[in-house]
Amino acid sequence: MSLPLVSVIIPAHNEEKYVERCIESINEAASVYGGDVEKIVVCNRCTDHTALLAENAGARVVYNEDRCIAKVRNDGIEAARGEIILTVDCDNRMTRGTIKEAVSLLETGKYIGGGAPIRFERYSFPLWCNDIMCRVSFGLTGLYCGIFWAEKSTFESVGGFTEKKAMEDADTARKIKKYGKKLGRKYTVLKENHLINSTRKYDDLGDWLYFKLMIKNAGAFAKAAFGNKKDLDKLFDELFYDYNDK
């Protein structure tokens, strides 16, 4: 019995420092899986050597100019040839059994898809606090993110990732979970594998980064709650869409 083709979507904005190690982690997971795995790096406004390094590492490269991570991922899914889709951000890595476990869960017919536990590549007290917050949040909502995995047809049926600048991951998980409920299939999380989450922003800006940002930008979050997202969009641009331009 042949294993289904898997496509791993890797959004990347000027990620020449990280793209090779991300692809290496996927290659290791592919060797454990045993089937064919295509790697698609979606170069988003890249001005460095990300595309060249990705191609040299065996990935297929597609291009996107949007300032919206959901649109970047959706372009990768559209280009994918695989029956099953996984996504992983370019500065992160997957553990060796990730692809095999995700495919095995889908093939039981019990699950519509899911996410992965998130573990930092290093730890400190504030990062443990971040870790605990994530575990509690995911545990309460069941909207696991990190590495997304589902059949390509599922992503197509729910309209892909919700096209918003930030927090699109929770919205997308919610859509897939709702769609799965209609089909009698559960949205779940990997049990034996996890996402290795990059700490580069903490390395650059301090381990209390997100706690400080929540306090410093409380006004922006409050305005956004009442429909004025200008200040919050500016913050998201600085943290995500323009970060590697520095």
Image (cartoon, helix red, strand yellow):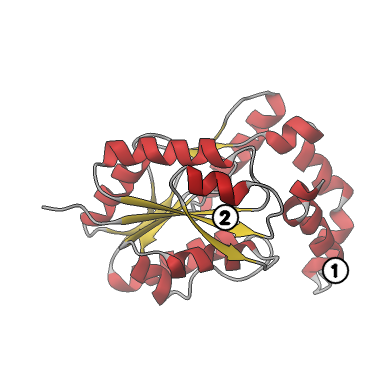
The residue closer to the viewer here, 170 or 58, is 58
Q: Residue 29: percent from the left, percent from the top?
A: 36, 38
- The residue positioned farthest toward the left in the image shown: 1
Q: Is residue 100 visible?
A: yes
Spatial distance from mark 2 to mark 1, Cα to Cα? 24 Å
Looking at the rendered structure, which numbered label has been put on residue 4? Answer: none
Which residue is drawn at the image coordinates 34% and 71% (left, top)?
A: 153
Q: Residue at x 33, y 41 (%)?
A: 30
Report the residue marked by disc 1. 230
Q: Nearer the viewer, residue 217 or 88?
A: 88
Image quarter (top left, top right, bottom left or bottom right) of the C terminus: top right
Q: Can you give x and y, in whole percent of width and height, for residue 201 in the image?
A: 73, 38
Give the label on residue 11, or none. Answer: 2
Res. 24 image quadrant: top left
Point out residue 56 in the picture as x, y percentages from the top left corner: 49, 44
Would residue 20 be found to the left or right of residue 239 on screen? left
